[in-house]
Amino acid sequence: MENTHGLRLRRAEKEDCRFLYELRNEEEVRKNSFQTGIFSYEDHVAWFERKLEEKNTRIYILEQDGERIGQARVDLEGQNGEISYADGHSLPSYDNARIWLKCILDKADPNWLKFNKIPYMAIYSFVLSPLTDEIRLVRNESSGPMFKEVIPESEFAHITQSMKPGEELRYALILANVYKKGLQKLEFTIKKQ
């Protein structure tokens, strides 16, 4: 697939089995998974070989400058697909989901050092919700804000219980530095399935 900023997404191969096993058992991955235990290598190999053979499953490896850095799996059901990531399980629960923020600026870019200094780091996010006039400030933690802080329970209940399939809500995050000054605006859409 397309190579952008040294990133490449490719289909998984048998040689990726050990990488996926190690990724699946990383503490951070397990902490955000439905199954938090450590998997045996034998069980993983059996699972991986079975998934490679399934016609309706696609496992992709994300590489940056030739180094494997992540994975995604799509399980197709008709024309729809369920996307899984990191540890091979469905998306995490509401309490464990995170909105991941990653710097995509190439390390060779002359601005890379500048944007990795404290005044330019996205420590906070201001949340602009389509369901309220309130602007919430949330901390981004190490990799981004927790989903439940961006979309609190009352709004999540509205999405899951009141919206009809196909309806969408558009949220915005204003990434802010340690001084709570805005750096960048991100928008994302929540679509009821």
Image (cartoon, rainbow, N blue to C red):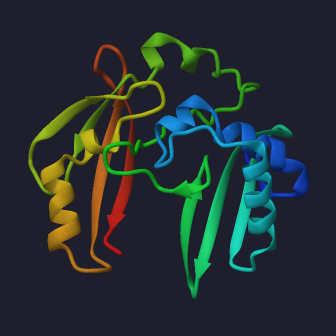
Q: Single out the residue that lies furthest toward the left.
A: 133
User: Dividing the picture into quarters, in which one does residue 46 lie?
Assistant: bottom right
> At 69% across and 72% down in the image, what residue appears?
57
Q: Position of residue 81 (x, y in %)?
A: 56, 74
Let me know if residue 130 appears in the view.
no
Q: Is residue 32 above or below residue 132?
A: above
Q: Is residue 155 above or below residue 23?
A: below
User: Dividing the picture into quarters, in which one does residue 114 lie?
Assistant: top right
Q: Position of residue 133 (x, y in %)?
A: 9, 48
Q: Is residue 59 above or below residue 77?
A: above
In the picture, the quarter occupied by the N terminus is bottom right
Q: Position of residue 45 (x, y in %)?
A: 80, 53
Q: Single out the residue that lies furthest toward the right.
A: 15
Q: Is residue 98 left or right of residue 3?
A: left
Considering depth in this image, is 73 or 182 the residue closer to the camera?
73
In the picture, the quarter occupied by the C terminus is bottom left
Q: Is residue 52 left or right of residue 184?
A: right
Q: Position of residue 188 (x, y in %)?
A: 38, 55
User: Dividing the picture into quarters, in which one does residue 137 lie?
Assistant: top left
> At 61% across and 47% down in the image, what residue appears?
86
Q: Single out the residue that lies furthest toward the bottom.
A: 78
Considering depth in this image, is 52 or 73 the residue closer to the camera?
52
Let me know if residue 61 appears in the view.
yes
Q: Is residue 11 above or below residue 41?
A: below
Number of numbered discs on residues = 0
> At 46% across and 19% down in the image, what residue appears?
120
